[in-house]
Image: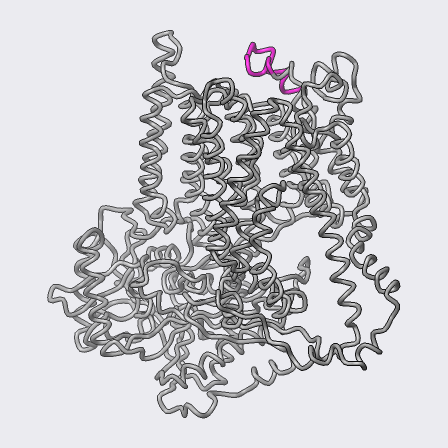
Amino acid sequence: MDWLADFPPGVLLLVVFLVVAVESLGVPLPGETVLIGATLLAASSGLNPVFVAAAAAGGAILGDSIGYWIGKRYGRRLLSVLNRRFPKHVGPKRLGAAVHLMRRWGPWAVFVGRFIAVLRIFSGPLAGMFRMTYPHFLVANAAGGIAWASLVVTVVTVLGSAATEFLHRFSWAALALAGAAAVVIAVVVVFRIRRRAARPAADRAPVSMTEAELDELLSPSGSVPATTDADARMDTPTTRAASSAPVRTDLRAAIAVVLTPLRWALRTTPATTAFVTVFVALGVVTGGLWRPIDQAAWYPAFAYGVPSLEAGRWWTVLTGMFITADPLAYLIAIVGAAVFGGWVEVRFGTLRASAIFVAGHLVGVFGALGAALALARLDWPWAQSLVTTLDVGPSCGILACVATATAFMRSPYRLRWRLLLLSWVSIALLYIGKIDDLEHFITTVVFVIVARLLLGEHRSTPRPTMRDWRLFAVSGLLVIGAVQLLVTLVPLDGPLGSTTLTQGSILDVGVDTIAILVIANWLRRGHRWAWWAAMVLTVGNLLVTLALIALAWLAQVPVVASTIWISASVLWAGQAVVLVLSRHAFRVAANQTRRRLPGAIGPGARRARARAAQLLREHGGGPLAASALRRENRVFVTADGGHAVAYQQHAGVALALGEPIGDPGGAVAAVSAFATAAEQEGLTPAVFATRDERIVPEGWRVSPLGRDLVLDLSGADASEPVGPDDATGAAGADPTTSILVPARELPWELRSQIRALSSVWVSDRHVPELGLTVGSSIDAPDGDDREPTAAVRVSVVTDAAGAVLAAVSWLPIPGADGTVHGWALDAVRRALPTDDAGTTASAGTASEEHTSRAVERALTDACRRFASEGAAMVSFAASGLAQDGTEPDGAAVRTMTGIAHRVDPLVGFAEIADVAERLGATAVPLYLACREDADQPRVAYAAAAGFLTGIRLRDLPGLSGSLLAR
């Protein structure tokens, strides 16, 4: 805690307040250690210790309160998922009992938990999750926070530095007692359960709670589920006679059940269990669990480093793996080794897991020592300090296991976690730069690259989705801003020098932070202007750094400003690479060319969209009108304001989508006006997926594009099912559940599964993300409620375990006077087929037969629901990608056929057509129109650019030619 000495008294109190508050939120920070260090500094600097105690108590109260509200806000979601997935273990009675215990004894648990290591981190979120009333929580939280802070400050003030070991010993001893108490309670609970084993099986059936029941249970006035008849029969003489097994036998059995996890760990993860046991035992023996040990006399005999190897202590490379230098590192190492080391051992066996752990440790240690020795020859002060440093800990082996685990995660988590891991070790090396940071960086890079090769398994590199690219770009900016703010509070000495701020660098950090906060949300939504703003900010920071370096070189003087600019420039360079690679993901309101129609951007665009929305309410529209006002689309309004044309602009082509919005009698004039305006701006006009070939100007080239399948519901009887009941009959044998809800009301667990399925299909199966006439509404948009996507509905079919088998999104077809005339199928997501080679059954996978059946049920159930609500029609294929089996006419149509082939494994056009035809749908031809044959290649590329994000011109021949050979 030497870094605390650099702060003035006021900042020191703020640091104590913030660290304790963040720890109380649920983040494992060393709050108690910071409080002890601040109290010792207060005694030597004249600061009143009462102020330190007040800061700690205030941080504890505020942090626990925020943690309480986080648990109250998001805990219900977690309990809902657990109840659906594990109704036997998280059923109504057990949840009711937990809520009852929390309300009765929770305040005491909150008060006592403040004095126990680890437990103080989770008391607030758990109290909120189980709906302890806030007044009771606040009283217990305030009492515990004040008592804890007062006790720590008093003991440290009276005993001085000797209090550190005493308090840490007390905290860990309290944790050990709490663990022992938990074991005893578990034995008692299991014993009571076994004594009730005579209950009839029907009475013990697990019950899955509805959302309303769970809300009622967790509400402040909610009650524990009432006692059932089965509960009343529990204590009858017959039941007691049936469960009259000897108490000693049941007690032994209960102890055996409680110790089952330990036996399982010894049987399946012997190496991990042995390592953690030895690691904890040495922590107790050496005292490392409650005090730093790097100043102990025996420390050099165990720690590895260049001095140890030069002294001939070669064994330190292995012995240093079993201890760490401070208590916080012990806690992190125990959790990391148990979780990631245990996972790798279960997944690959004891021998290979041990090899990964040891190899990671050796690669990190020897790689860092070799790099330090090589760089020290360059007279680099940072490297010269590394060759005199000793280190201990198993962190390199744990990171090797983490990198190996991330290599086997499913998309999109595999790529995200690997980039997060690499970013973390890179930033730590850049700004902190200790010997362990260099070890972590080398180990992580090596094992991220070679993990799968070492294990003899291969998987294609995941391709980032558009959502991933946006996430990477936004996360990069936020990380850079957070790092720069952090070094303003805690100056660091990294490989590139000190990050102590000067007046100029403070101004630079302030400007960067404000700019990042302004553009981050717009960048997350994919706005093109935000991408340009981020690029300008990134390039500007790089140019400033280059200018400083050039000025220092020309003037032959050191850099005047702080090296914070040079350190940050490395991060900005990485951000520039991410922005360049992700440029195709930011297409909302794009202004990529000076050639544009009136009202394409700016205030005119807002007026045009508002007029188009008004026309939709007045006149309605066709199936494509449901997606006309998507943010990716532009709107052209005729001079008289009577018609609007939704279009997209790509590669110098203005591609109109469907028919004009407005009075059908003026559609021909509206298309002619659109074409004239486009030609005046030097754009090539074209019309995509129109149902009426007569609306295009005379002499244009019209090609059959495909077909839409339209189901007429106007004459359907709401009391009779629409179409055959095959899907329902199949669902009776295969228990699935079908729901149809607005996208914004989709449960969180289903929404996350659907997004994961989208990412897996794009990343692992390389199925392209679609745009133009097919949107991402199925991924539950999070835009403005006033947008048309707010009315999207999603039909989801899940299996008995709650895993999503199929999901279909529907867009409302606007009718006259603001009514909903019908519904248009927008996008389809389905579980990965387990029949493919290399696919193992897991969450998000299903056999092809089950998936097809689920898609069929999603379609048929939705049609029945729409018919019962009075809808007049359902459109199954308005996108223009569904083919009718005829020979493609022209390059543009051949390109659409190629795109359809690429996305067919996910969408299943033939399967949807089969279901639609059995429901009684009729075919409606769709057309693509352009001025002449010479426009076909350009229109083909524009349509492909609209459908496929990031397509390049050289990809066009593959879409229009080779893919047709499949």
In front of the other: 786 or 228: 228
- What is the chief secondary structure element of the magenta stretch? helix
In what quadrant of the picture does the C terminus appear? bottom right
The image shows residue 642, relative to residue 174, as above or below, that is: below
- Residue at 26% across / 58% down in the picture? 634
Magenta extent? 370-385
In front of the other: 939 or 715: 715
- Asked if residue 942 lies left or right of residue 864, the reply is left
- Residue at 54% across / 23% down in the picture? 40
- Asked if residue 735 lies left or right of residue 63, the reply is right
- Asked if residue 192 lies left or right of residue 836, the reply is right
Residue 492: percent from left, percent from top: 49, 22
In what quadrant of the picture does the N terminus appear? top right
In front of the other: 325 or 595: 325
> Which of the 4 quarters of the picture holds residue 735?
bottom right
Residue 664: percent from left, percent from top: 21, 77
Residue 591: percent from left, percent from top: 27, 48
Residue 781: percent from left, percent from top: 40, 60
In front of the other: 839 or 1: 1
The image shows residue 928, relative to residue 503, as above or below, that is: below
